[in-house]
Image: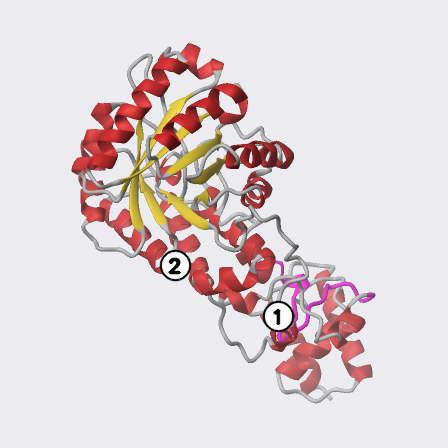
Amino acid sequence: MCGTENGTAGAAAHLPASSPYSQVQDYISQVGRYKIIEKKASRRVNPPAKQDIRYAFAAAMLTCAQFANAFFTTENKIKIATMLSDFGVDYIELTSPVSSPQSYEDCKTICKLGLKAKILTHVRCNMEDAKKAVECGVDGVDLVIGTSSFLREYSHGKSMELIQKTAIEVIEFVKSKGIEVRFSSEDSFRSDLVDILTLYKAVDKAGVDRVGVADTVGGATPRMVYDLVRTLRGVVGCDIETHFHDDTGCAVANALTALEGGATHVDVSVLGIGERNGITPLGALMARMVVTSPEYTKSKYKLIQLKAIEEYVASVVQVNIPVNTLKHYIIKKKKLMLPSSSSTTQSPDFAPSRTRLESTPRIIDPAIFGLTRYISITSRITGWNAVKSRVQQLGLDLTDDQIKEVTAKIKQMADIRPLAIDDTDSIIHSYHLSL
């Protein structure tokens, strides 16, 4: 992801060449060369009885579609796919063409756009679905089948031996068409370790491009993820894709840990939206990786475009952008930000020292994402140093004692009702005119 030059964010110039959070990694770590697979939104389809179901594997398009409010027109899908490709995602995974006639047509349409990102589609591991995917002209086919005892009993009823036999047949067919193929187990962390390692080893030998590990129910912890991925890395030579649901709040941490353990690809979705609590959010993962692997992340992905992508997807699915996104961290939590380069809080105890420490940026420079820092002076806990910064921005000449007086007026009004920046500016201007 690429940063932007911003004259008001002078603190960025003081950032170290490499982040102090860029730890020395194991030789298997992929944090400096990871790839992103964006899942496409589409509603979950109820398959015939005894067939495996796949509901949120990857990001932006497939997973978004499984969100409750999701309805994407062909035009929506084209715009989202184009934005994601321009942003720099490596792959875009589309809804299964078997899901509906329109999904089939949309898949073919997006494949013809000539995007930089490779187009994938996610299908059940059977020959009928694979043939339908190949017809669409995709760059890759993502195969999935449940491997836990729960899914084998209640979903498709297949034994591990039959799963392996079917998987190899379908993989060989897709590879014969010159198309990438990923094979993933579903519900990987509730599957028997020996069973899935044996299966992964067999499909790796069959020539699969990637094997996938999926925390389908969102219950895995970072330590569990590292142990499984690190073990798998010693069994297969192909790439490893990972998919994490966020039911227990570990999706981003699990994605980072998977990369540290040797995984090469992470499934994400815009705003993390998807079935239930969704999956690893694109923006949150970028925030993590721009700290962990800043040079690689800023050079590979156009971070400045992330805000527009999130706003567009949010408008399509008719949701507010969640409060734990970068947009809110940098813009809407105004209490934490200063207008030029340093950061502060509204607390008068912290404002003076933090206002002066303009060479000490926060962990993420908002200019990297095309955003700017500014301070909020609309709260009853606003400090006079914060107001002084705004007075200087307005080009007014007030002494420190006068600024303290106008700060008291702002606090008095903030105790009565919520204030907007226009309100505080009016108080400052009125005070200045009365002098």
CB within 8 Å, label 1 to label 2: no
Please name the residue shown 43% across and 34% down the image: 212
> Horizontal and vertical percent for residue 339?
62, 74
- Residue 98 image-quadrant placement: top left
Q: Nearer the viewer, residue 418 or 101?
A: 101
Please name the residue shown 47% across and 31% down the image: 214
Mark toward the start of the polypeptide (1 vs 2): 1
Position above or below: 285 against 308: above
> Horizontal and vertical percent for residue 17?
62, 70
- Residue 410 image-quadrant placement: bottom right
Position above or below: 27 against 245: below
Position above or below: 339 against 265: below
Q: Which mark is residue 17?
A: 1
Q: Marks 1 and 2: which is nearer the front? A: 1
* Residue type pointed to by label 2: Phe
Magenta: main secondary structure equals: loop
